[in-house]
Amino acid sequence: MVIVLLSKAIEEFEQYMEGREYSDSTIRGYLGQMNVFRRWIEGERNGPVYLDEIELSDLEDFISAQKKQGKEASSRSRTGYIFRSFFKFVERRELGENQAKALEPVQPRKKERTYLTEGEMHRVIGEIEKPLIRAATVFLFRTGCRIGEATSLELNDLDMENGIVHIRDGKGGKDRRLAMSSDLKEELEAYLDEVRPDVESDFVFATERSGSLSRVYYNSCLKGAVDRAGIDKDITAHCIRHTTAALLVKKGKDLATVQRILGHEDLKTTSIYVHSDMTQVRDALEAI
């Protein structure tokens, strides 16, 4: 077995992920976390660290340090997942032992999904002041897309003639196609013709200054609209996705169709939304 620096192994891990065509966001997330760990352990050891020097206790100590820094359980759980992925790669390439094999998973506390009712959703859209944010919100609501899928959407991903949206390199590196509703098609046509600035950018949702739309800016504008609508809920872009999913299920759409729209790999993920609306649960029990 060769003796390899942790920094070198991380570089090889990057090449491996690129070769397997992981999404850009996944590669950035994995590398970012592994390099945070590298800097931490190099600080603990006062210098560069080799793979054969790393033990299970180091991984556990790093996750404990994250907890002391106030990192939520979901964030620490993701760190564990990244460790397991990285050290499986290390083991397969015979660069070292899989020190994460016995790493206990962090169990994130399950949070109730926050979403809007259909009426609340329309109230929020009505309170949005910026045409760019309105168009992006209608897009998210009418497609159930993730905010990252919306902000990375390019002009050639829109087939306006046939009313098709191409979602490329979604979560898990998968593509999918979505049909535009008549409302969404009308909204996008108006946005592209009358609102979108003439900038050298391929992104559909673009500001004049940067040629793109940041998640932070979008969520800030969305929060303002929610407040103006008088809705006492902590709503983010991802909550709009929950809203779309819950409404699709409430309106009787089958789970396989909802799964395809949302781009879920596992139907179990989609099935969460069956009972996301307590009104449905109450109505079902009243019928007994």
Image (tube, rainbow, N blue to C red):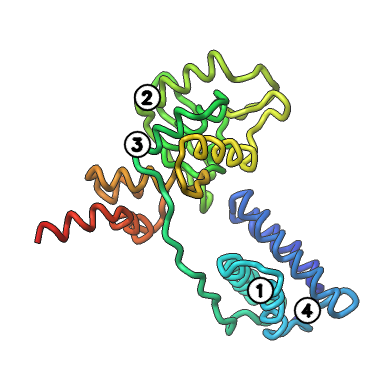
220 and 173: which is toward the camera: 220
Pick whichever of labels 1 and 4 is earlier in the sequence: 4
Residue at 61% in and 29% down: 203
Task: Name the quadrant of the C terminus.
Answer: bottom left
Task: Name the quadrant of the N terminus.
Answer: bottom right
Task: Indicate the amino acid at tag 1.
Answer: Lys
In the rendering, at what x and y percent does residue 199 appear?
69, 20
Q: Residue furthest right?
A: 46
Between marks 1 and 2, how big is the CA–CA gap? 45 Å
Q: Mark number for residue 119? A: 3
Residue tagged 2:
183
Residue 152 seen in the figure: no
Pick whichever of labels 4 and 2 is earlier in the sequence: 4
In the rendering, at what x and y percent does residue 52 appear?
76, 83
Between marks 1 and 4, how big is the CA–CA gap? 34 Å
Residue at disc 3, secondary structure? helix
Drawn side of residue 259 relative to residue 220, left or right: left
Residue tagged 4:
2
In the rendering, at what x and y percent does residue 23 appear?
59, 50
Between marks 4 and 2, how big is the CA–CA gap? 60 Å
Q: Residue furthest left?
A: 288
Q: Nearer the viewer, mark 3 or mark 2?
A: 3
Task: Indicate the amino acid at tag 2.
Answer: Asp
Residue at 32% in and 58% down: 271
